[in-house]
Amino acid sequence: MQYNFDLENTEALLSTALSYEYNKNKFDKNSYTNLGNSSNMGLVVNYNISDRFKYYFITEYKISNSTSNKFQGSNMAFVLSMQYDYTANNHKIIINPKLRYYGYEFRKLDYNKSYYLYRHTNSLFDGAVYFYALKNYYRPVSQYALYAEYYSDYGLYSLELNLNWDWQINSKFGHKLDVEMFQFYRNSKDNGNYYTNIYYTSFLYYKFYKGFKGGLYISNKQMNRDVLYQTFYQMQYPFFGFHISYDGAFEFGK
């Protein structure tokens, strides 16, 4: 059972929110045991400096039966984000850098080792019986589910840079480019280490009618279907394909 309480304040340029979430008798599918109660306290701040510049900050602190009641960084998580929007002529560009941190104690209740991987020989589930909606492929790579895959006694830091570029070449042709770059740092007691991922998708399309287009698609982003909540693999070599999209605004002859 879950209870949520929120207190919000919204103004022209600045909005803030305080949240409290209480989870009663959270069940651990890993051990088939009751983990007891947990609670999250959060703060969200949105600041729109102008039409082009936006700032976003969110932080949460988790307390549960398996965490210490003493204030410590491993119980915390935060995301600090800035977004820059640029529109001129036939170009629309969005640049979005982010800094993330997820503490070990914050993440550990969201990871279930024995059933998390479908390919695990002792898995409680069979990945073949599940269907994933195609729209899930268009989710960003950097989601909380990605960070919850890592289970050890360390904090996770991530520095991200996301780029979305939409170029309307003429009335019929256009190009979309999405790039997601982030560098992880694992603050392990044994050895801290860095590693970097770069995902990209490029779509050169022809607009057949309003709302309906198709064209050449190139990407190194492949859905990871080995886990209960799918994330993504970075492929060593890109794949090519013909992509068709429909945005729901189809008008024949336009």
Image: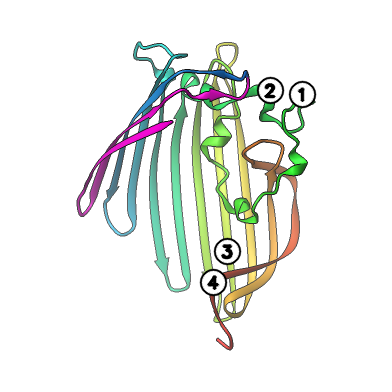
Q: Disc 4 designates what residue?
A: 248
The Cα–Cα distance between marks 3 and 2, rounded to whole angstroms, is 40 Å
Q: Which of marks 3 and 2 is nearer the N terminus?
A: 2
The residue that mark 2 highlights is 114
* Residues under numbered marks 2 and 1 in contact, where contact means CB atoms less than 8 Å apart: yes
Q: Earlier in the sequence, mark 2 or mark 1?
A: 2
Mark 1 or 4: the one toward you: 1
N-term-proximal mark, 2 vs 4:
2
Q: Residue at x 68, y 70 (%)?
A: 215
| Predominant SS of the magenta segment | strand
Amino acid beneath label 2 = Ser
Question: Which residue was labeled with disc 3?
Answer: 176
Residue 122 numbered tag: 1
Q: Nearer the viewer, mark 3 or mark 2?
A: 2
Look at the image and say whether residue 78 sits in the magenta stretch. no
Mark 1 or mark 4, earlier in chain: 1
| Span of residues in magenta | 1-30
Q: How crowded is mark 4: few (under 14 residues within 10 Å), some or many (20 or more)?
A: few
Badges 2 and 4: C-beta atoms under 8 Å apart?
Answer: no
Return the disc, 3 or 4, that comes first in the chain's sequence.
3
Q: Counting other residues with Cα less than 10 Å from the Cα at mark 3, is it few (<14), some (14-19), or many (20 or more)?
A: some
Residue at x 34% of width, y 35% of height:
4
Place of residue 92 in the rendered image (x, y in percent of width and height, measured from the top left): 46, 65
Q: In this view, does 202 lie above or below 39?
A: below
How far is mark 1 from mark 4, CA to CA?
Answer: 43 Å
**Closer to viewer: mark 1 or mark 3:** 1
Measured in 3D between alpha carbons, the distance from the residue under mark 2 to the one under mark 4, in whole angstroms, is 41 Å
Callouts 1 and 4 close, C-beta under 8 Å: no
